[in-house]
Amino acid sequence: MTQASGIANEQTSTPLSSSKSITLRISRYNPEHDDSSKFMEFSVPYERWTTVLEAILEVKKHFDHSVAVRYSCRQATCGSCGMIINGKPRLACFTKISELNSNVVTVEPMNNFPIIRDLAVKFERLFDTHQKIKPYLIRDDTELTSDEKEFLQSPEEVEQYIQFANCIKCGLCNSACPTMATDSSFVGPQALAQAYRYVADSRDKGKDSRLKIIDDSHGIWRCHFAGSCSQVCPKGVDPAMGIQLLRGYLLGFRS
Amino acid sequence: MPQDENKEGIGGMINPRRYGIERVAYLLMRLSGLGLLAYFIGHIYETSTILRGQVGWNEFLELTQTTEGHAILAIVIAMCVFHTVNGIRVMLGHGGVGVGKPARPDYPYDPASQNYRHKIGIYSAIVLAAVAMMYGLAVMFGE
Ligand code: HEM
Ligand code: SF4
Ligand code: FES
């Protein structure tokens, strides 16, 4: 390849032209006919900006198309690509290989979710628990019929819940939680944080009914404030904060 | 057939290495709670020896005069202090005290609930437990 003009320097290089590479270890498991999971290793070239998701897609493109992975937006918005990367739950599209500081990158399916195949897991429980806490405004009137047309909020009122509204339902928090590790019925940090999101919304009138739902033996009381959920959340939701503020209502610290 | 939920299990629950000092505190709180419960049961048994009169009482109490007895009591002191101090921190946190205020999150999204106030609480609990244990050891072994 000649470097005749300055433009030639800027050609879009395929990742394969990179000089650096890592070993990508992918957990492979098909519950339908495998007894246990096993790792397959691939040498994948990367640049400073290459994400773990891109590395996995590189494997699918050049080495093994059958690797099962779920993704969509590639920009930490859809919440599809959560997985265990080098031991911790992270979004594959939001984790750069270079930030892991390791020559070996191991990807496994998220814990505390049933495995569909390889890296793809089932989200039914997360969606069920999310629905259980009534993730919508509860009040008698609606914006459609009221003369006001919309329910006004001050910027300060928005500030009270907007952080929790950032949740993309990726499930990383539920995968990091020590209670989820052993309790199949726990409502989980994702849903509890969403319960707080609506309770803290000045337009919402459903506080009492939501508190009743989470005041359960497998509800909010199973949270021990270990904070791992908040440490892995890729959107700054800080579920642990929401859960403790929520529990403040039940314990009488707040009203 | 119930589907395998791929839960991390007890091994994942007690692994203190991945999620900072907060997860270490979580583990120590559980261990010290269970340790204190075991001590409490032992303590009830120990004091029940009074039913065998002064001789029985003294016989049992001699167990605490051995090196192993001293070591166990030192650990009980440490568990007691850690559990109490960290317990107060956890109770405040559970009520929403010191967990930070909701705010519009900004990259890199450091969670406000994992803040220095609670970290100081955890480290104080550990340091106070260590100091109390050393004082106990000094009293028990330093005749
Ligand atoms: C002033 C003394 C104490 C305080 C402030 C205290 C506080 C607490 C708190 C806040 C928890 C809940 C921790 C969590 O949610 O993770 C707890 C758990 C526990 N405590 Fe205590 N406690 C005290 C004394 C004791 C004693 C004397 C015993 C034993 C007889 C004990 C046994 C336990 C046990 C077994 C647990 C459960 C551990 C777990 O499930 O993580 N505690 N304590
Ligand atoms: S709270 Fe954070 S980690 Fe949990 S599902 Fe929502 S975005 Fe993901
Ligand atoms: S692909 Fe959408 S969050 Fe990663």
Image (spheres, rainbow, N blue to C red):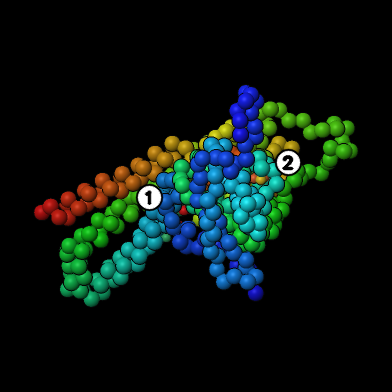
| Residue bearing the label numbered 2 | A204
Quarter holding the C terminus of chain A is top right
Q: Position of residue A155 (x, y in %)?
A: 68, 27
**Front position in the image: A248 or B78:** B78
Amino acid at pointer 1:
Thr
Density class for disc 2 (Cα within 10 Å; few <14, some 14-19, many ≥20) is some
Q: Is residue A15 left or right of residue A127?
A: left
Q: Residue at x 30, y 65 (%)?
A: B43
Q: CA distance from mark 2 to mark 1?
A: 38 Å
Residue B84 is marked as 1
Q: Would the CB of label 1 be found within 8 Å of ligand 1?
A: yes
Q: Residue at x 71, y 28 (%)?
A: A154
Q: What is the secondary structure assignment of the residue under circle 2? A: loop
Does residue B123 appear in the picture of this structure? yes
Amino acid at pointer 2:
Asp
Q: Is residue B64 left or right of residue A230?
A: left
* Residue found at the far left of this picture: B143
Q: Residue at x 39, y 61 (%)?
A: B34
| The quadrant where residue B65 appears | bottom left
Residue B128 is marked as none
Does residue A185 appear in the picture of this structure? no
Q: Position of residue B25 (x, y in %)?
A: 41, 49
Q: Is residue A135 left or right of residue B68?
A: right
| Quadrant assignment for ligand 1 | bottom left
Density class for disc 1 (Cα within 10 Å; few <14, some 14-19, many ≥20) is some
